[in-house]
Image (spheres, rainbow, N blue to C red):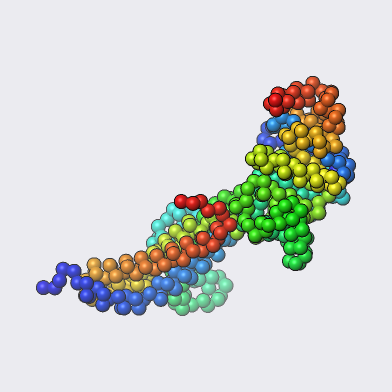
Amino acid sequence: MIQLENITKSFKKTQVLKNINLTINQGEVVTLIGPSGAGKTTLLRLLNWLEVPDSGRITVGDAHIDASKYSKHDVRRLRGQSSMVFQHYNLFKNKTVLENVTESLVIVSKLNHKEAEEKAVALLKKVGMGDKLHDYPANLSGGQQQRVGIARALAVDPKVMLFDEPTSALDPEWVGEILHLIKQIAAQGMTMILVSHEMRFVRSVASRIIFLENGELVEDSNPKELFENGKSVRTQAFLQKLTYEEE
Amino acid sequence: MGKIFDPVFMIHSFPEVLQALPTTLFIAFMSAVIGLVIAFIVSFIRYANIRILSPLAKVYISFIRGTPDLVQIMLVYYGIPLFLKAINAKFGTAFDVNGVPSIAFAIVALAINAGAYMSETMRSSLLAVDAGQLEACYSVNMTRLQALRRVIVPQAIGIAIPPLSNSLISLIKETSLVFTISIIDIMAQAKIVGSRSFRFFEIYVVVSIIYWVICAIVAFALSKVEVYARRYERKVDK
């Protein structure tokens, strides 16, 4: 389903991803954890080609792309496989809630307005935003904006959904409901990759956890294994630090 | 011995000065429209950093910003005829330089001038749109062009309107320079009326009021456009 082969990426002189190899199967809910600067977000963004790797190959669904040689067509094909939920929501500011979701349906998927609206309204009702269709993002709370962000990402019928710290910009009171929503989507069998610091949530939703540090995959395991007896010293140190913060 | 200041004469001069108003408005309007088109194209060349064209655009902007408006008008007024002559000589064509009305030179010069200033405004407005907006477009698989058209440019317009209003108002006022290439705009008309009566001060008060009213109307209209263009933004209670 998803395959990363020999991915490297540097920003200026800092190497943020060092020869990453990773395979993810359909239906897996993979969470990337690790200290800040580990390369989690960069890894996630590569899959949507928001970051371009220096070298390596990426396969998502039936799109393949090679960083050493690719066309615009390859990029669009790759992007067509996945969709992203952003930390800061990134809703189209000049569009209403409804338009945020219909936009890609009309412009990219080429549905007519009526079909697009029906689909968008159904999705927005599903995420609990059915009563705010004509509001602009600026007039919504963070939690409401992120619900729309999720609806927008669902609208393109992605094979994989990517979540980049979807709750870290939210007030604590909204975190629970967004996590609940993500869990619902996961329960329907959607393949997902998340970057998250909500360890309790990660533990309950993830089928697989990958611990990254300094641009390397340090540990790749299931939640029970990793949390209860993480093999690597570095993973344990990281988890311990988080547990202290929680207590 | 006449009055020191003659308000009656002043009021009576309005209609005569206003005879030239259509000329002023025509020059301002045409050069604004052409200037906006130039600015739009140049801002995209710079925004997308198109090879060869982008450095040329930079030189163009630098030159316009670094030379007086009056000099630019003169360059166009004396330069275009030479240019046409050269073309005639080279290609055996027969463009009639004398057939080109002065007003065309004025419009070209002012449009080139305003285009340079406005292109910088537009470019910085495009850059001021949050990068996350473009990423969101890409994440739902829009192309760069679709993203620009549907999301980035509409937001940039909202940002650009206040500084663009300044440029457009400056442009209206700069039309007062065209009397130097023998166009009868309201400024030239004022000179004519003034030299006949020797009441220059009164006449220039008349002219200043006319410019002020035009500029105030344009500023008001553009502020309404701005409210519309930024309707999606959050309002802060004062």
Looking at the rendered structure, the number of numbered marks drawn on it comes to: 0
Q: Residue furthest left?
A: B1
Q: Residue at x 76, y 49 (%)?
A: A83
Q: Position of residue B7 (x, y in %)?
A: 22, 72
Q: Residue furthest top?
A: A233
Above or below, A202 against B191 in this view is above
Is any atom of residue A104 visible in this view? no
Q: Position of residue A143 (x, y in %)?
A: 67, 46
Q: Which quadrant of the view contains residue B73? A: bottom left
Q: Residue at x 72, y 52 (%)?
A: A128
Is any atom of residue B90 visible in this view? yes
Q: Position of residue B104 (x, y in %)?
A: 46, 72
Image quadrant for the N terminus of chain B?
bottom left
Q: Residue at x 73, y 35 (%)?
A: A198
Q: In this rendered view, identify the residue nearer to me: A38 or B34.
A: A38
Q: Which quadrant of the view contains residue A206? A: top right
Q: Residue at x 76, y 55 (%)?
A: A123
Q: In this rendered view, identify the residue nearer to me: A122 or B217.
A: A122
Q: In this rendered view, identify the residue nearer to me: B194 or B212.
A: B212
Horizontal arrangement in the rendering, residue B121 relative to residue B78 (left or right): right
Above or below, B54 against B209 in this view is above
Q: Position of residue A153 (x, y in %)?
A: 75, 51
